[in-house]
Image (spheres, rainbow, N blue to C red):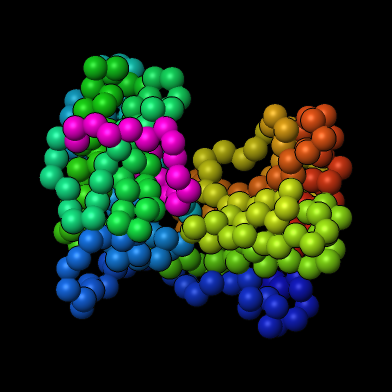
Amino acid sequence: MRTPFGAVALGAALLLAGCSTAPAAAPPSSEAPGPLTAVSALGDLGTLDYCSLLDPALLEGSTVATPDSSFTDCQADLVQKGRRGSVTIGPPAADRDPNLRQYAYPGRLPDGITVRQTGFAPEQACARAIIFADGTRLPVSVSGGDPAARCGGADAVVGGVLAALTGNGVRHVQFPDRSWGRVDSCALLQGHDLAPAAGAGTETSEGMTGHSCIRGTVSVDFAVVKQAPAGPPETLGGRTARVATDGAFCRARTVQPSPAVAGRAEQVTVSVVDTTGSGGDAACAGTRTAAALVFAKIP
């Protein structure tokens, strides 16, 4: 396997364990049942197969395509009464969300679990949040499709997630050797070479799943995507990349064919946020510098 660091120990620090794509059931816990936390219910969020939580059959009156499992979520396209839509589970989050509101969830809840509705959601979407005893929340949303069935469908998907949690349905994946799912995202942002872009004295902060990391004004995240990013290509860190602005952010993306799923790509995004109020264009020089350093480190 290619190790651009040139040192075996540093290359190993970038890789997480795992060597095949076969999903494996989460090992049963020997502890007495108690309030469900994210760890006790889901296990390692970095290797969780989020699509093992989705039961498409619960979306009545829907034609649901084969779900796509990314590193941090699961998404499936659907059609209801001729109208296209989608259902999404994830990504997990731990920060407080002031937009969550109580509502009468119609199903039974395991010990330690609450379900809230999201007051702030994209137009034509119905969003729920499954909240574990430790405060971790797992978003569930249904967008598009039949408006009359949207929120009922979201509640049905929530019920399927809860059934997976309590019925030994949670599964995990083992990433192939060359999968970017094995890369330690924060290792990519460490080192003095990134200080000019990230800010002096900044430290890395890892996302909940391990597939994203932030250091100052620079962030990196990994995902599985259906299509490669659009835009004029350029070479950064020895890889073909696309750079584009997004509000106050400037983002550089590069992809590789997924070694686990045919017809899909693994994508890494390096983002830099402009803090001067000038907009994303002002951050693109820093983005290119950071992306060149990060992309060169990826095995």
Residue 13 sits in which quadrant?
bottom right
Indicate the quadrant where residue 249 lies.
top right
Task: Measuring from the top left, give residue 184's x and y in whole percent.
Answer: 60, 66
User: Does residue 115 lie above or below 166 as drawn?
Assistant: above
Quadrant containing the C terminus in the rendered view: bottom right
Above or below residue 54? Residue 208 is below
For the point 78% across and 38% down, the residue is 274
Q: Which residue is at a point 58% across and 55% down the rendered structure image?
A: 212
Magenta segment boundaries in residue numbering: 87-105
At 63% across and 71% down in the image, what residue appears? 14
Query: Nearest the camera: 235 or 45?
Result: 45
Q: Is residue 281 visible?
A: no
Percent from the top left, x then y, of residue 99? 42, 32
x, y percent for residue 278: 82, 29
User: Hey, which quadrant is residue 189 in on the image?
Assistant: bottom right
The residue depicted at 68 percent of the width and 51 percent of the height is: 219
The answer to whether residue 60 is visible is yes
Verify whether residue 99 appears in magenta. yes
Magenta stretch: dominant secondary structure: loop
Quadrant containing the N terminus in the rendered view? bottom right
Q: Is residue 38 left or right of residue 91?
A: left
Residue 151 is a magenta residue: no
Relative to 96, residue 33 above or below: below
Q: In this view, does 274 lie above or below 61?
A: below
Q: Looking at the picture, how far across and down is residue 273, in whole percent? A: 74, 41
Describe residue 161's horizontal placement relative to residue 20 as left or right: left
